[in-house]
Amino acid sequence: MWHRERIPLLLAFVQSVLVVGWCFTEMEAGPGAAMSTQTNGDRFKIEGRAIVPGVKTQDWVSTARVLVDGEEHVGFLRTDGSFAVNDVPSGSYVVEVVTPTYRFDPVRVDITSKGKMRYARLVNYIKTSEVIRQPYPLQIRSSGPHSYFMKRETWGWTDFLMNPMVMMMVLPLLIIVLLPKVVNTNDPEMRKEMEQSMNMLNPNPELPDVSELMTKLFSGSKGSSKAGSSSKGTRPAAKRR
Amino acid sequence: AAMAKLILLWLKCVILYNAVGAVFEDQVGKFDWRQQYVGKVRFSHFDTHVQSSKKVLVATENNVFAALNTRTGELFWRHVDKSGPEGNIDALLHHGQDAILVVGNGRLLRSWDVNVGGLNWEIVLDSGSFQKACLVGQQGTVKNVAVLKKNIISLHYLSNGHQKWIENLPESETVDYQTVYSGGNGEVYALGIVPHSHVVIIAYSTDDGEIIKQISVEAPWLSNIVASCAVIGQGVLICVDSATPSLYMCDLHLDTHDLQMTQIPLQSLGLEVAPDFQPVLVSHQPNSAHQPLSEFFLQLGPDNFLLLQLNNGQIVTLRDFKPVRNLFSILACPGIAVACSINLFSAETGRRLLDTTLIFVMDPNGGKPEKIYIQPFLKKDDSVGYRAMVQTEDHTLTFIQQPGRVMWTREEALSDVVTMEMVDLPLTGTQAELEGEFGKKADGLMSMVFKRLSSQLILLQAWIAHLWKLFYDARKPRSQVKNEVTIENLSRDEFNLQKMMVMVTASGKLFGIDSKTGSILWRHYLEDVPSNAAFKLMVQRTTAHFPHPPQCTLLIKDQDTGLTTLHVFNPIFGKKSHVNPPALPQPILQSFLLPLMDQDYAKVLLLVDDQYKVSAFPSTKNVLQQLQEMASSIFFYLVDSSQGRLSGYRLRTDLSTEQIWEVVIPMEIQRIVSVKGKRPNEHVHSQGRVMGDRSVLYKYLNPNLLAVVTESTDTHQERSFVGIILIDGVTGRIIHEAVQRKARGPVHVVHSENWVVYEYWSTKSRRNEFSVIELYEGMELYNSTVFSSLDRPHAPQVLQQSYIFPSAISTMEATLTEKGITSRHLLIGLPSGGILSLPKMFLDPRRPEIVSEQSREENLIPYAPELMIRTEWFINYNQSISRVRGIHTSPSGLESTCLVVAYGLDIYQTRVYPSKQFDVLKDDYDYMLISSVLLALFFATMISKRLAEVKLLNRAWR
């Protein structure tokens, strides 16, 4: 018995011990060591200008940065919105202007090994060879403020009334209230017609009513001893309603 | 059928849209907070060009340049440069509205507009290692900045950064040019030295860079100008020599070629140098357009400062400061004191100014003062007032106003959080009382009844007190009501949403932060922590074991020697525990917590030393006995990334170890970058996934699985690759191996449940890619009750899919909830400062390329190569976090809610609801609507009842 209890416990231990053992040596090999930058090669400059239409540059430049390939190279914006990222070796880069308030689309900039032919294009990660030329020096125009927030569902009468559930409730109610007024129930012909249509709806009059069926079902456990009299028992209940 | 498909599609869109959590605008600041830091201050200047300016400029060791508000300590603006030596700030010069920075070992020269926080200009300087920069003035105005490098000197205009002139320094191979000086008279002096031989003085004309004169002065006793020389008064170079001991002087302006240094023995001034102390000279130049002051400081011993004055070629002692800590303004610390006093002295006379004493009360849990920055100002009655910013060893900035009122403190150590844990808060006294009632043994019916009654009474009392407090607070104006959190009134809330964040920083200062408000509840500075220490924080005992106090253990490991110390403390109060940790004479290789507990409910910490011997903490008899019983089932692994070796060990009953497996990854080809296990507190709720045809695909939930990431040593873009190996940590069995060709790191990995998600850089397509591996047992489970690594004959099915991610990432973590029912999200820290909450369902290798009926049934999203970044998914909206280094997730008492802390330069805390708040009423729940509807219905029934009665009555009368 004791053993039986112990085995799963043991296994549980095996499970957790390993997971807890988190190695100290792991810290030493940081991922940062992976990048190697050549220091002796020629370095170039990426220039451009960021524009937020209708907003003074002083209001947003202090929170903005230019990121080249993540945080590989960082540039800052001048008070007039222009920027230059210095010290960039030749290669292909994604240049992004980052602010917490305004959205800028990233641009890919290619610098040849001689640094002469630099051109900018829209970023396309799927078709990497596709080139849509952009002006250089870069002209990056903001496409508006970032939308960070979801809209709250607001409650209005129209929303409420147009809700399908409400529609489903209200329409039959209207029919129930309005139909007797429109149709004269005292007219014997009409009554006959209605009875006929009711019969059409309920083709087999022998079938018990749904509500009766339900009540039978629920009272069945109690009233099974008095089988047969169940229909009698439900009558008063129905009447009370 | 087409219609049905359309509806299905629409439904799915709705589901997707709903499944993704986002922030509503009115939730801003409700349960989230951000704290922004700058790092340890290296240079600081008060902005004095406008009298009413409230700015202090700081340049820090984290390559941050910022302006702080001197009234509140908050940031006006902050610029975060690239980390590492390329963004290193070498010098900060401040003139008027402009602040000039030399960045990246003299690579860049930048000028910032202090008011706006925007860049004026940035230029690239010629290569060469940076020595010194200074502002150059002419006729009372500062127009240029001079930059001295190893072999060149250049002058730039302050207005646009353009180079005015650049000159090669003569004989720069032999002469070590160390400093540059300008007295505002149209000349720039470059001072160089040939150690133990002579000093070279070159004067350049400010206008065209012409050498006006070039002198060399014999100084065989001098080895370093910066350390032992200073320029004072009207261009007099003064040096101190500890060997003779004496002061040497020479006038830079004299135009003779046989310039000599005049020696003034310190004995003639009646001074003595402390033994084994290198004296230091400090001068001060308040305005770079003018000469430096003719008064200067001479430090003769660790706490012996002298204020001297050069008067007509004669040196006069103005004042002798004996018990002194710091310079410029004097921070007097008598002995080992709790409080320091700051006094202001007149530099001209050396007299103490009246009423300028400022008492600085030191935090007993902080460090000693290191630097002081003074902001003097003239009061209305023309007396001198001042404010002081004190920087202490633990990177804290304290801003003090006379007579010692602390205006603000900034804990800059928090800019470098290394690791953290979230600890549950303790129960209140009454809650604990109730809990205790159930824990105790029953001692008779009557006493039990009485106990129950009394505890109920206590609860009632507490409730009434709470109501009274509510009532009392409601009468007070809103602004006065402050729910200040202190250690005393800390208690767990009903959903356990408020926790204690225990943060360990690189400087060795520990913090306890309330997760709800972000206020620092305790701090503890650990002295003598080595600068290259690695930390690991473990919760040994949680707050659940009242009356035993909670206990955390911090492992501090010197990465050079491997020697380790333990610091045991209470995570709620920050106090050092009475428990004495064992001394560890051997380097420690591995440490891990066992799920075993001693009789005081403390989890057992096992430490493996370099002899592969295991020691336990706590190591009571009880623990050792338990360990002996359990030894055969305790396995651990070691990683030696320098040798590329992974090895598994098993514990023997005598606490020695035996190796049971070893995997060697050839070092010539690839190296181990990281090893990731699963988190021990992770729960997985469902064992499998229900497929479209109602069968179940069971997950391969191996808790011992390790994800080993390797990178190729060859970094050529055609041949580099990233490998991932899934190894069972107990048996060493390789479960799966995947290689991503033409890819390189940095690789970020998240390993959880039955999946591993990793991100790498694809060198071929020059983009970031995500890849996900999921492991499944198949359609039936081998042993559904318990998992054992030793008994799992079938290899799991492996599914993998990759995606394009349109941004680089900084860090990545998965959400974690109490029971694991809630769907998972990945929290991705982006370099732009956002934290993206990406639903795991987008990273699902079963996403079909062609949509079928079954995949639709399963709610799988059709495969699309590119993952989207939607700003609505940013959990921190516009509160961007610079340089996110880690994201810590912690479950709360609510299954729907996961607590998230992101740390880097900033700290941000929030809650996320990956599957929306399904277990609590939403905070926009319309109480008004529901109650008005209920009321309306109630009245409607009343009225209709009445009407019906009237109608019945009428009918009866008819």
Image: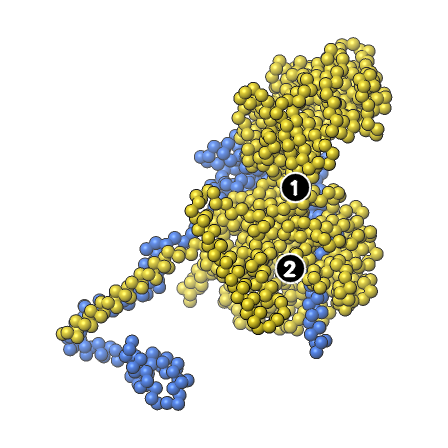
Chain colours: A blue, B yellow
- Numbered marks: total: 2
Q: Secondary structure at mark 1?
A: helix
B622 or B12, which lies in front? B622
Circle on res. B392: none
Task: Specify the quadrant that holds the C terminus of chain B.
Answer: bottom left
Q: Amino acid at mark 2?
A: Pro
Residue B665, horizontal then vertical, whole percent: 77, 56
- Could you tell me which residue is drawn at 37 percent across and 83 percent down? A216
Q: Which residue appears at 19% of the width and 79% of the height?
A: A192
- Chain letter belonging to callout 2: B
Q: Residue tagged by mark 1?
A: B413
Picture coordinates of residue B456 (x, y %)?
Answer: 52, 63
Quadrant of res A118: top right
The answer to whether the residues at label 1 and label 2 have Cβ atoms under 8 Å apart is no
- Residue A223 vs B140, above or below: the answer is below
Chain letter of disc 1 in the image:
B
Left or right of residue A205: residue B228: right
The residue sitting at 77% across, 18% down in the picture is B238
Question: What residue is disc 2 on?
Answer: B547
* Percent x, y of residue B611: 84, 56
Do marks 1 and 2 share a subunit?
Answer: yes
Sequence-first tag of 1 and 2: 1
Q: Nearer the viewer, residue B487 or B82?
A: B487
Q: Can residue A72 be seen in this snapshot?
A: no
Residue found 15% across the figure and 74% down from its top: B957
Q: Secondary structure at mark 2?
A: loop
Specify the amino acid type for callout 1.
Ala
In the picture, the quarter occupied by the N terminus of chain B is bottom left
